[in-house]
Amino acid sequence: MVFSFIQNQKENSWMILTSAEIQEQLFCQHCSQEIYPGAWDEAIERVYAYQKKCFTPMPSGVQLKKKSKLLLGAVITVLILGIGLWLSLQNDWI
């Protein structure tokens, strides 16, 4: 029997999105079927509790990749330059 703890992670070219939801599954390799929690006995419950304590989930949230960080930096730079230019034109500094 194999316990699996699965945390969904979606990735594209801009970011990595990790969900907080953790899916748990018990799979019997002998009969090639999933065993649902209603059919677990006390021994399986103890092993499950131990395995769940040992599992360390990844932090959930959004992680930006290099491409999106560069684009965000460029947009912020253009905005700051645009505001500076607008202020200088309003106050006749140029």
Image (cartoon, rainbow, N blue to C red):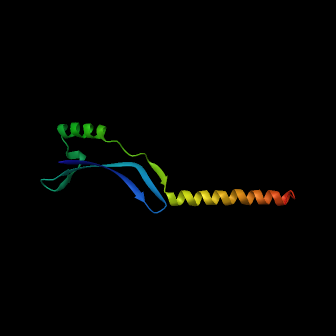
Furthest-right residue in this view = 92
Instruction: Name the quadrant of the C terminus.
Output: bottom right
Residue at left offset 49%, top offset 61%: 14
Answer with left or right where residue 27 lies relative to residue 90: left
Residue at left offset 42%, top offset 45%: 59
Answer with left or right where residue 85 lies relative to residue 51: right
Q: How many marks?
A: 0
The answer to whether 72 is drawn above or below residue 53 in the figure is below
Residue 33 percent location from the top left of the image: 18, 55
Residue at left offset 79%, top offset 60%: 86
Residue 78 percent location from the top left of the image: 67, 60
Q: Which of the 4 image quarters holds residue 76?
A: bottom right
Residue situated in front as seen by the camera: 73 or 33? 73
Residue 37 percent location from the top left of the image: 24, 46
Furthest-left residue in this view = 30
Furthest-bottom residue in this view = 13
Residue situated in front as seen by the camera: 76 or 26? 76
Q: Which of the 4 image quarters holds residue 40?
A: top left
The answer to whether 39 is drawn above or below residue 84 in the figure is above
Residue situated in front as seen by the camera: 38 or 66? 66
Residue 85 percent location from the top left of the image: 77, 60
Residue at left offset 72%, top offset 58%: 81
Answer with left or right where residue 63 lies relative to residue 52: right
